[in-house]
Amino acid sequence: MKLEQVFSADGALATNIEGYQPRQAQVELATAFAKAIQQKELLVAEAGTGTGKTFAYLIPALLSERKVIISTGTKNLQEQLFHRDLPIVKKALASKAQTALLKGRSNYLCLFRHKQHQNHGYFNDKTILADFKKLSDWAVKTHTGDIAEVTTINEDSKAYPLVTSTIDNCLGKECPDYADCYLVKARKKAAEADLVVINHHLYFADMAVKDTGFGEIVPDSNIVVFDEAHQIPDIACEYFGEKFSTRQLVELAKDIELAYKTEVKDAKQLGKASEMLDASAKQFRLEFPLEAEKGNWLKQAKTNKCDTSLAALNQAMDFAYEVLKQNLSRCKSIDACFERLVIIKTSYTRVNDFSQQDASLWYETTARHASLNLTPLSIADKFSKLREEKNQSWLMTSATLSVNNSFEHYTKLLGLTEYQSLELGSPFNYPEQSVLCIPRYLPEPQDRNVIKVLVETAVKLMTASQGNCFFLFTSYRVMNLVAKSLRTKLDFPILVQGEIPKQKILDKYLAEDNSILLATGSFWEGIDVRGDALKCVMIDKLPFASPDDPLTQARIENCRKKGEDPFNQIQIPQAVITLKQGAGRLIRDVKDKGVLVICDPRVVNRNYGQVFVQSLPNMKRTRDINLACDFLKQQVKNKS
């Protein structure tokens, strides 16, 4: 079957998809990718929202009849691609290709750990016990062991770690349940499949760590597609670095205690080792402020208050090392705990080596844990070497890769020099469907009156749109202050990120006719709300990375050492791509209409503002908030 015939007005897609219309940009992307497959090239392609890039890469990939890996940005996109898009394309092509969905280890039921906790029977929390019972009921019925099948438990339930494994606590081939392991079965199926859908974290976990228990995580292939490829630089940096976390020690302590109580009950020193690891990890977390934060570890480590807790950590790990060593070969759980501790101690040593060059040493805290991180300032050498070693056809695609019509920022980060590029605009009629408003008289982001003005602006727009609005923020602090004020001024349902889980907040937003969502971080991308449910997207300010972010600081300093301009080389390109992602939430379909409002005067009163505007879709532009409100009121009127 020829590519052109598949996408034609009377072709395979039109026959199988009601209302299908050929899109020129979609055909261009598919044709360019087919060429890259034939010539084993790398194609870097920006495909604007609505291009239909998923079908554009799935069809040439399947028609090639070669082994294909498709890597997506998130597990949610993985599920959508595998369960919704892929079956449609396979049916249209009458393809017999074997396909598989492969996730990371912690997404599968671990039979061994489930039995351990089921037999141990120790639960100090009724909620955890109730969730564990639900998981046990599901465990009897599941065929895949994929925990995504469980819909009656919150995603953040503390029962999940009791029935899943991590690379730290997995016993690998030494596991008594290895023959029935769901992860082994999933990887075997992936190895035999023609097309495998994974995610970026899994791909780079495979690149960084060759898993001795199971061999390579991701099977080798002829073709690799990276969808949502704008995430690749940050994710690759994470996996080419090093991390030590108190969470690792707390979980190790629990597993040592479990082994002591169930398998080696005479080894009382194991109980003491478990207590020391747990206590020292929790004490180390208390050396940082209660609020979650990031910071420079080199500076923090030099403060006197860290000395005592670091010494306690070392003492606890050394003691646990000796006790575990004395009990080696008594049971597989103890052997696995010993290996984990060796790896943890190695990571701990690396993140505390302050003599390293071209790397950022930084810490990050959550409510319960602290992590020490080593991140390389550049992965260009490592990534380009990876590309050279793989004799494959690659497609790296996203709606947001270019900055000011250039891919140089992206390809330079990854050390890519030999590639083909393609920039395809969205098929949407933005001048007719949307308005970009940068209101007059807005204060600078640092102005003391900014919260008051943001609230006043939001009330006008949200009243005009009758809710149906996303307000995206660059900080939790500003988001929460605005939310508190809006709730006293508007009667619409106001949903705030962090108050309930992400999926529940989206479900609640869609269930109401006039909801307002205030969010930051992960809501800037990967959210697909179509139709009248979203008429307005507000953005509080240009999304420059926080100057206090330790990794950003290190990259800026490194850039200066090279005699380059970090603002133009690093900060602006990153902010442009983030802004494009946020703006992309507004128009998701040919029938959508709405207003994008950027509440930052720097867009118009700074020279660099034009770089941001030129990177956005060609919307109708205004500085008059009343015109934006009139546009929204007209949409409400049309709906009624």
Image (spheres, helix red, strand yellow):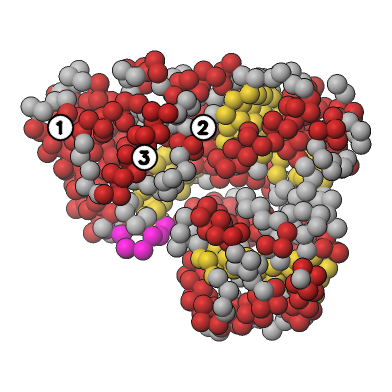
- Residue 84 x/y as whole percent: 66, 37
Instruction: Tell me if 316 is positioned left or right of 487 in this view.
Output: left
Mark 1: which secondary structure?
A: helix
Camera-near label (3 vs 1) is 3
- Is residue 253 visible in the rendered structure shown here? no
Instruction: Tell me if 133 is positioned left or right of 402 in this view.
Output: left
- Residue 350 x/y as whole percent: 36, 39
Residue 103 is marked as: 2
Q: Residues within 10 Å of mark 3 (few under 14, many from 20)?
A: some
Q: What amino acid is at disc 2?
A: Lys
Residue at mark 3: 134
Camera-near label (3 vs 2) is 3
Spatial CA distance of label 3 from label 2 is: 22 Å
Answer above or below: position of 221 versus 632: above
Q: Which residues are magenta?
A: 287-294
The mark nearer the N terminus, 3 or 2, is 2
Identify the residue at image location x=79%, y=28%: 92
Instruction: Tell me if 430 is positioned left or right of 71 in this view.
Output: right
Residue 261 is marked as: 1
Instruction: Tell me if 231 is positioned left or right of 242 in this view.
Output: right
